[in-house]
Amino acid sequence: MKFKGTSALAAAMLTGSGSAYADQPTPAVVAVHYVVNEQLAEHLEKSVLDPLERTCIALPRVSRVTSTASDGYVDLEVQFEGGASEQDRETVSRRVEELAAEVVATSRTVRLASPRL
């Protein structure tokens, strides 16, 4: 489709692409979500976040680990250089399972996601 006398931004908006820039998806991260019985953030940091962060930051290609804990929930994002892959998700999942005896949780989920934290 040709747009005569129209800026690239306007052309992109008219065609529905929403961006005048090359489509570059946000690199995926591996998101880890825990539901735990512990409610105090201080205890969650020591018993859940610290072990998870230590094990994840040591993985190859990890560029950043961010986390948050509150009211019985723990969320951790593991960012990899170039974005996370399914293989990275599996690696993090294995590490989470290895920590299962150390980190007691009601449920845990490991998935690929867009960065939120």
Image (cartoon, rainbow, N blue to C red):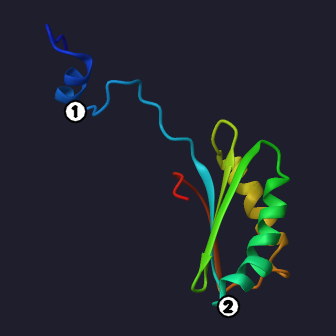
> At numbered mark 2, what does the secondary structure look like: helix, strand or loop?
loop
Q: Amino acid at mark 1?
A: Gly
Which image quarter: residue 31? bottom right
Identify whether 3 is placed above or below 93: above
Identify whether 4 is placed above or below 104: above
Q: Amino acid at mark 2?
A: Glu
Q: Quadrant of the N terminus?
A: top left
At a point 77% along the width and 63% down the height, the residue shown is 53
Q: Position of residue 19 (x, y in %)?
A: 32, 30
Identify whether 9 is placed above or below 40: above
Going by the image, does 117 lie left or right of 89?
left
| Residue furthest front as drawn | 42
Q: Nearer the viewer, mark 1 or mark 2?
A: 2
Going by the image, does 83 lie left or right of 17?
right
Going by the image, does 43 lie left or right of 20?
right
Q: CA distance from mark 1 to mark 2?
A: 47 Å
At a point 14% along the width and 8% down the height, the residue shown is 5
Residue 10 seen in render: yes
At a point 60% along the width and 60% down the height, the residue shown is 111
Q: Position of residue 3 (x, y in %)?
A: 16, 12
Q: Position of residue 56 (x, y in %)?
A: 79, 58
Which image quarter: residue 17? top left
Report the residue marked by disc 1. 16
Q: Quadrant of the C terminus?
A: bottom right
The front one of 34 and 66 is: 66
Label placed on residue 38: 2
Q: Earlier in the sequence, mark 1 or mark 2?
A: 1
Label placed on residue 29: none
Identify whether 111 is placed above or below 49: above
CA neighbours of label 1 inside 10 A, class few (<14), some (14 to 19), many (20+): few
